[in-house]
Image (tube, grey):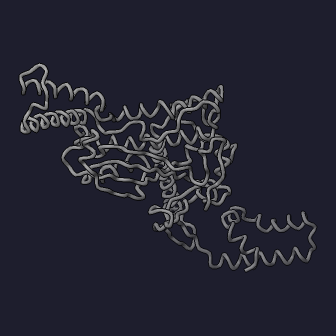
Amino acid sequence: MNKVMEWIKGHWIVLAMMGGAIVALPVMVYFASSMSASAKTKIEGEIKTDWSDMTSGAKVTYRVPPLLAGGKTLEESKEAPNPSLTEWFKAALTKQAEEAAAVVARAVALNKANHGFLVPGLFPDPKGNDQLLRVSMARQFTTEAHGRLLAAIGAGAPPDAAALAAELQSYQLEELKAITGSDKPDINTLGQADKDKLATKVLSKRVGQYQAKAARIAVYADVGVFRLPPFSESPPPSIEQCWSWQNEFWIHEDILAAVAMANQGAAGVPGAVIKRIESITVDDFPGIALGAPGGLGEPRPGETPGATPPPAGEAPTDFTRSVTGRFSGPGSNNGLYDVRTARLTVIASTRNLPKFFDALGRVNFMSVLDADIEKVDIAQELGSGFYYGDEHVSRVTLKIETIWLRAWTVGTMPKSVRQALGLPIEEPPAAPPQG
């Protein structure tokens, strides 16, 4: 069928509304382009023939497409438009759009919840002294903010080794005095049975202190678990580095929130699911070395630079990359979200570890991509002051996928970051999170 026929079929709704204007259309084309009379006659004839062919077997198809790939399409075909069906399908499409919008709104709200700025006024464009704000961001990220995070979930360390050693020495002296009846006792005067008894008492005292501290905290962790860079104000960090730190801090917040959720209701470390956090590290933003001191750096090997289209349709998947298939970055054709992975090593209750996996998904869009489980040397851990209770524990190293919806994160990105990700640099930013 010729091109005229194809065009008419693609615009049949418009043509039906135009009515008699169909015949006038080629007339206007003729006069506008000074076409010959013979060409005009030929085109009019083709239009009449094709219009007759199309309308003789015309059907109206009503359709509600599925929201997700693989879903069922709701479809109905009729010989002519049916007002009742038109209204029904219109209502169905409207309802579908409203439900989809509500799901998106809930997803964005979950993804954004409780994620404020460490330094208000810095993103997406500094409001005030740019250099001062960036130095403030470096101070917050490297020295101040993470201590507050750990305090908020009840994290703590084992008893101070030096202070405990002094306390145990004093306790041993008092016990030795009681055994010998002397104010200046000599342990070498004791028999082996008394020495063993004294050693057992001191050990029991030591373990008791470990148990008492474990009962007062929710999880073992200190700021060293984050592997933070040292604070430096000269030169100040780039705006890209600051933004990367802010996003990394949000990931730290979410992981610790999941730890707190999994441990909720536990009586200290012995009853906790996650008993100790050993390390949390966040990988570079996909495709771009945002951590470079001078700026964005270069795309990493294997990543193809190029513009990322605006959000539309489904995000691409590639199951050779991970069990979820999700990926992002320049050249990925994913305009819906960014993926950033984190590595977490913990000592956890082996039996209750699935509760932590569940908590990750409930806090935000986080998925476990990989898990390595190792045996824990309990005696060695206890010797370092870590008391985990009576249940079996394992050292677990997780690779965690985190998702950041661009529906709200684009509004936090500096122009240079948006440009590096292939986004419009002049796009009006969304309302930033409060902080």
**Residue 419 image point, x, y percent:** 68, 47
**Residue 219 image point, x, y percent:** 31, 39
Please give left or right for residue 28 compared with residue 65 in the image: right
From the viewer's perspective, is residue 47 above or below residue 213?
below
Please report the residue visible at 57 percent of the width from the left and 28 percent of the height from the top. Answer: 136
Image quadrant of residue 306? bottom right
Please report the residue visible at 77 percent of the width from the left and 75 percent of the height from the top. Answer: 47
Asked whether 257 or 102 is in front, the reply is 257
**Residue 178 image point, x, y percent:** 7, 24
Image quadrant of residue 199? top left
Question: Would residue 434 be visible to someone looking at this image?
Answer: no
Asked whether 37 or 330 is in front, the reply is 330
From the viewer's perspective, is residue 52 above or below residue 428?
below
**Residue 166 image point, x, y percent:** 25, 26
Asked whether 314 or 355 is in front, the reply is 355
Please report the residue visible at 53 percent of the width from the left and 48 percent of the height from the top. Answer: 405
- From this viewpoint, which residue is outermost toward the top? 183
From the viewer's perspective, is residue 47 above or below residue 329?
below
